[in-house]
Amino acid sequence: MTVMSQRVAGFGTTVFVEINSLARQHNAVNLGQGAPDFDGPPEVLASAVEAVNSGLNQYAPGVGMPVVREAIVKHAERFYGQKIDPETEVLVTTGATEGVFAAILGLTDPGDEVIVFEPVYDTYVPNLIMAGVTPRYVPLRGEGWTFDPDELAKTFSPRTRAIMINTPHNPTGKVFSRDELRAIAELCQRHNVIAITDEVYEHILYDDAIHTRLATLPGMGERTLTISSLGKTFTVTGWKIGWAIGPAALVNAVNQAHQFITFAVASPLQAAAATALSLPFSFFENLQASYQAKRDRMIDVLTKVGFHVFKPAGSYFVMVDWRGVVPKQVQDDMQFAEWLIREVGVACIPASPFYQDSDKHLGKHFARFAVCKKDQTLAAAAHRISRLG
Ligand SMILES: Cc1ncc(COP(=O)(O)O)c(C=O)c1O
């Protein structure tokens, strides 16, 4: 008996499950999945505990608790100067993941096309497929992971409904520049297309990188849905508290789907989200300084043993080209990841799963290391990797 629907049959197992299982078997230091091995700010954790103990344990309103919608609005004003109506222009979702899926279901129709940049974060394409939408890919290439503006322009068609932009970008660490976003904005307006942005790494930026919110560019406020979440910024990836903000018509469309996917999001964690989003500037500065040190340490050790490092401008990740380091029998990124786990005792994520089948070769020589780990974990990984030198 065939039990699996055709809709999901092609999805297979994610590379994260495979790598985590192999890493466990070999007792490897796991720099694979982008989940921190340390906790978020104590006052945020305490706020969740207090909310549970004070009886905030029943359904929240479907669009989110007023206190967290207010906090999301204030955060957007504080960091990006946006003016958002907490009543109609904010929706709280079960992480950015649900926000993205609800956005696709609420804003596209079967047969539409949606443009994504490749390498592409792993949930987008399965989400599009489940919605009956055709993904159209624009590759990011070279040292700065740039796109060819002509190639992007040619990818727009009369069927294009939306474009998805993830900045800072997973897995490359690219932060889309203002000029790149302007080029995207111009095409969106010319073709009357919606932009869906995923900005979950908005506060994890390196050196002098600046995160530009596409919604704040001229003409984009009315056609951009901005999605973000609590997980990365506040080191609570397991909480799955996210939000979508944008013009009321877009947010309402996303809510049409959200109300029948999860309906409402964990109440006590929403209360704690309000505490988190209201933390002072110093919290965000310290977060960046701490990640800067982690990134620099990993870049240093990886470069010293001969990896070509693509210096990330943001996100949890460092992408490398591994060809300078491995023995001849290692031919592709999957073999590289296995070899690194078995022989070196460190786990990373191969890059080709972030590419569509016909473009896998573009990711074949790359692998992604996560730096969102305790200094102790990074030291253990660094010690093992440095033996390669
Ligand atoms: C680009 C990107 N979007 C979304 C998510 C998931 O966000 P959330 O945990 O809020 O659903 C991740 C997590 O790794 C991510 O890297």
Image (cartoon, rainbow, N blue to C red):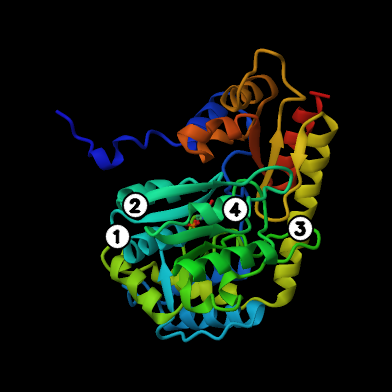
Mark 3 / mark 2, whichever is N-terminal: 2
**Image position of 372 with respect to 319: above or below:** below
Mark 2 closeness class: few <14, some 14–19, many ≥20 residues within 10 Å: many
Q: Do tag 3 and tag 4 residues touch (Cβ < 8 Å)?
A: no
Disc number for residue 206? 3
Q: Identify the image quadrant of residue 253.
A: bottom left
Q: Which residue is mark 1?
A: 109
Per the model, the C-alpha gap separating discs 3 and 2 is 35 Å
Residue linked to disc 4: 150
Q: Which mark is residue 133?
A: 2
Q: Residue at x 22, y 39 (%)?
A: 5
The spot of residue 203 in percent (x, y) is 66, 64
Quadrant position of the C terminus in the picture: top right
Three-letter amino acid code of the residue under disc 2: Val
Secondary structure under tag 4 reads: helix
Pick whichever, 45 or 191, lies toward us.
191
In front: label 3 or label 2 = 2
Q: Is residue 181 visible?
A: yes
Q: CA distance from mark 4 to mark 2?
A: 23 Å
Instruction: Tell me the element at label 3.
Output: loop
Instruction: Looking at the image, tell me whether mark 1 or mark 4 is earlier in sequence order.
Output: 1
Q: Is residue 190 left or right of residue 12?
A: right
User: Identity of the amino acid at label 1?
Assistant: Asp
Q: Which residue appears at 43% of the width and 83% of the height? A: 66
| Distance from the alpha carbon under mark 3 to that under mark 4 | 29 Å
Mark 4 vs mark 2: give the one in front: 4
